[in-house]
Image (tube, rainbow, N blue to C red):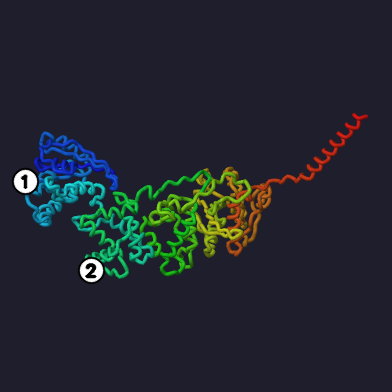
């Protein structure tokens, strides 16, 4: 919201512009003659009200002051256009409004009919109908209109408040007077607010949800009877609305449309700003991307509150209770967002995670997908937490409360488990060695003997149960044609927790690819690694390599390759071994020769030395006494 309002008071000579300003500032009518143009006045924010500084700029309509008038109009944020009789009223449409347009200014205009004490009270509604509404219909820049009297103090404060509101709570982004409809951007924002307030996603705001909505938006509860009044107003405006279950989206939009039509558009702005919308009806940048500092060698994961939020979302939108989110349920879930995250689309979601037999993502796959997204691109998770309405345990918590940062992992060779629940493993190997099939098996997909070459990097994520019942999310990634670029990128290697060197045990040319890969990229030696022989159900063949795989790993003081097949039920043991190695990286480095335990020898030598020393001292004493 704007924190500074600059009001330029314009109009013909003698309409009472200066008198309005003087009456507003002094809170009484100044009967003495005042100067033709008052100096600029700045009014600081009023305690207890909105934090807005208001500047009042008086102007002259004389031709010789036209340069100053142009300059002030271009500097202002709102124009108060004053008229007081039929002649100055005619000049509103014939001169002033076209003049503002000719200057290229795009600010709201508040139309003020001053000196109403001279024309009598009259019928205000009739005056609006006959005088002001035709002008407002012709010039959409006119935000509002009001009748005032500086002499009687009538609506003086109100006209300046209208000017302030025209800047702080503009009607233009919300409502189209020509079409008599809320504007599309406003409808989209209110639709998202409705979505967030409809906690049970039944399509209605029930009484409890309406009370919660009131408390969040206006920081105060609904008074007794107010909710029934709201329902009555909506029912009268939209007779087709059935409010027995609460307000549906149509009723909610109609209610806000009534606010706009009755000049209460500040109510809409209060609702939207409480839900982090800017004046351009976009969500605040700081709300979508709060500050998150991730130290070097650390990673990001979902916190318990984050997991609980995404689990609750899944359960709410799984309307048919089949344990999976179909296309319609996913579309409803992501309705208040720009759609699926771009990285999900690029990786052909939901093929990157666990699905049921119908191809719909399961709760296990849903949580795994968000775990991977948080690990690889935490800013995306924060953005979607904001879109989807995450609220932390405390009201002031930002979306970062849904994430946690792990301890920096600096020395991988040091014994012990790293403090991580999400780990990344690169699968490296020659073409057709079985990497893609391994990823499919990881996601419990049926075996497909047809070879599909991998062009773009492909990821798969699933949960793995480690010893002691601890759960870990393992991300497997094959690099495709981007393998050279990724392996040359130190930041990509730093993010990787484990390398799985995979070769086809039935292909004599397969293992040599791993040997050449390690020679070409010596930086891979700084990462923990596991060697895996795939297609172990096929006939094993001799590899055309200087050393056979077992001898090669023995020379490196590494564990021998694990022989597995995706057609065996024991394939799950490989994924457990990968997760264990990633969380205990020291176990996947070359073994060091353990030095023999010489503690007993050192103790024996120490005892012998002490005994000899004691015997020498006794001998010296006996010799000296003689």
Query: Of 117 and 582, which appears nearest the observer?
Result: 117
Classify 10 Å Cα crowding around label 1: few (below 14), some (14-19), many (20 and above).
few
x, y percent for residue 210: 33, 62
For the residues labelled 2 and 1, say whether their Cβ atoms are less than 8 Å apart: no
Outermost residue toward the right in this view: 626
Question: Which quadrant holds residue 68?
Answer: top left
Query: Of 209 and 492, which appears nearest the observer?
Result: 209
Query: Of 401 and 175, which appears nearest the observer?
Result: 401
Residue 414 shown left or right of residue 309 in the figure: right
x, y percent for residue 427: 55, 53
x, y percent for residue 498: 57, 50
Secondary structure, mark 2, is loop
Quadrant occupied by the C terminus: top right
Residue 462: assigned label: none
Query: Of 184 and 91, which appears nearest the observer?
Result: 91
x, y percent for residue 540: 65, 58
Closer to the chain start, of discs 2 and 1, is: 1
**Vertical placement of 426 versus 35: above or below?**
below
The reply to whether residue 353 is visible in this rendering is yes
- The residue located at (21%, 38%) in the rendering is 41
- The residue located at (59%, 54%) in the rendering is 502
Rounded to the nearest angstrom, the CA distance separating label 2 from label 1 is 45 Å
The reply to whether residue 456 is visible in this rendering is no
Secondary structure, mark 1, is helix
Residue 239: assigned label: 2
Please give the residue where the numbered disc 1 appears in the rendered image.
87
Classify 10 Å Cα crowding around label 2: few (below 14), some (14-19), many (20 and above).
few
- The residue located at (67%, 52%) in the rendering is 550
């Amino acid at each position: 919201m704007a924190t500074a309002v600059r009001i330029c008071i314009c109009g013909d000579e003698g309409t009472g512009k200066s008198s309005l300003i003087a009456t507003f500032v002094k809170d009484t009518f100044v009967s003495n003659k005042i100067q033709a143009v008052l100096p600029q006045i700045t009014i600081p924010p009023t305690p207890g009200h909105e934090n807005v500084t208001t500047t009042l700029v008086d102007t002259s309509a004389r031709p010789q002051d036209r340069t100053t008038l142009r300059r002030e109009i271009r500097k202002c944020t709102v124009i108060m256009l004053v008229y007081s009789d039929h002649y100055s009223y005619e000049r509103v449409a014939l001169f002033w409004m076209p003049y503002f347009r000719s200057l290229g200014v795009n600010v709201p205009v508040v139309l003020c009919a001053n000196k109403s004490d001279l024309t009598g009270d009259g019928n205000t509604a009739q005056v609006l109908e006959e005088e002001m509404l035709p002008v407002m219909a012709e010039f959409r820049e006119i935000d509002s209109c009001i009748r005032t009297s500086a002499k009687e103090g009538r609506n003086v404060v109100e006209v300046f408040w209208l000017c302030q509101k025209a800047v702080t709570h503009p009607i233009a982004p919300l409502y189209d007077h020509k079409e008599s409809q809320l504007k599309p951007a406003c409808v989209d924002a209110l639709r998202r607010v409705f979505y967030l307030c409809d906690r049970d996603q039944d399509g209605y705001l029930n009484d409890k949800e309406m009370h919660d909505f009131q408390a969040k938006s206006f920081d105060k509860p609904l008074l007794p009877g107010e909710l029934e009044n709201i329902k009555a107003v909506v029912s009268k405006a939209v007779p087709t609305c059935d409010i027995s279950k609460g307000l549906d989206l149509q009723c909610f939009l109609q209610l806000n449309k009534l606010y706009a039509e009755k000049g209460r558009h500040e109510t809409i702005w209060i609702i939207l700003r409480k839900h982090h919308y800017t004046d351009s009806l976009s969500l605040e940048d700081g709300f979508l991307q709060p500050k998150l500092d991730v130290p070097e060698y650390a990673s990001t994961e979902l916190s318990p509150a984050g997991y609980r939020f995404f689990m609750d979302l899944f359960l709410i939108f799984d309307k048919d209770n089949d344990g999976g989110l179909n296309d319609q349920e996913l579309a409803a879930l992501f309705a208040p967002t720009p759609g699926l995250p771009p990285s999900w689309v690029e990786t052909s979601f939901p093929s990157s995670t666990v699905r049921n037999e119908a191809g719909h993502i399961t709760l296990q796959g849903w949580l795994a997908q968000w775990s991977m997204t948080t690990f690889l691109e935490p800013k995306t998770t924060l953005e979607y937490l904001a879109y989807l309405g995450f609220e932390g345990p405390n009201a002031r918590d930002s979306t970062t409360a849904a994430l946690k940062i792990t301890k920096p992992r600096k020395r991988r060779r040091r014994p012990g488990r790293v403090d991580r629940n999400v780990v990344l493993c690169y699968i490296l190997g020659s073409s057709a060695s079985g990497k893609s099939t391994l990823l499919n098996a990881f996601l419990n997909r049926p075996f497909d003997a047809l070879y599909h070459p991998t062009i773009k990097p492909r990821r798969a994520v699933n949960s793995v149960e480690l010893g002691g019942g601890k759960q870990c999310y393992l991300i497997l990634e094959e690099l495709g044609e981007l393998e050279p670029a990724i392996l040359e990128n130190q930041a990509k290697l730093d993010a990787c927790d484990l390398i799985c060197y995979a070769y086809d045990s039935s292909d004599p040319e397969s293992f040599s690819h791993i040997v050449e890969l390690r020679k070409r990229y010596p930086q891979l030696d700084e990462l923990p690694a596991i060697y895996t022989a795939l297609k172990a159900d096929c006939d094993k063949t001799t590899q055309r390599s200087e050393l056979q795989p077992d001898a090669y790993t023995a020379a490196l003081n590494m564990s021998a390759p694990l022989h597995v097949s995706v057609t065996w039920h024991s394939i799950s043991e490989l994924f457990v071994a990968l997760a264990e190695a990633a969380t205990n990286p020291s176990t996947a480095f070359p073994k060091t020769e353990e030095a023999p335990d010489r503690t007993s020898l050192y103790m024996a030598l120490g005892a012998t030395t002490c005994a000899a020393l004691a015997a020498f001292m006794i001998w010296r004493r006996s010799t000296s006494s003689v």
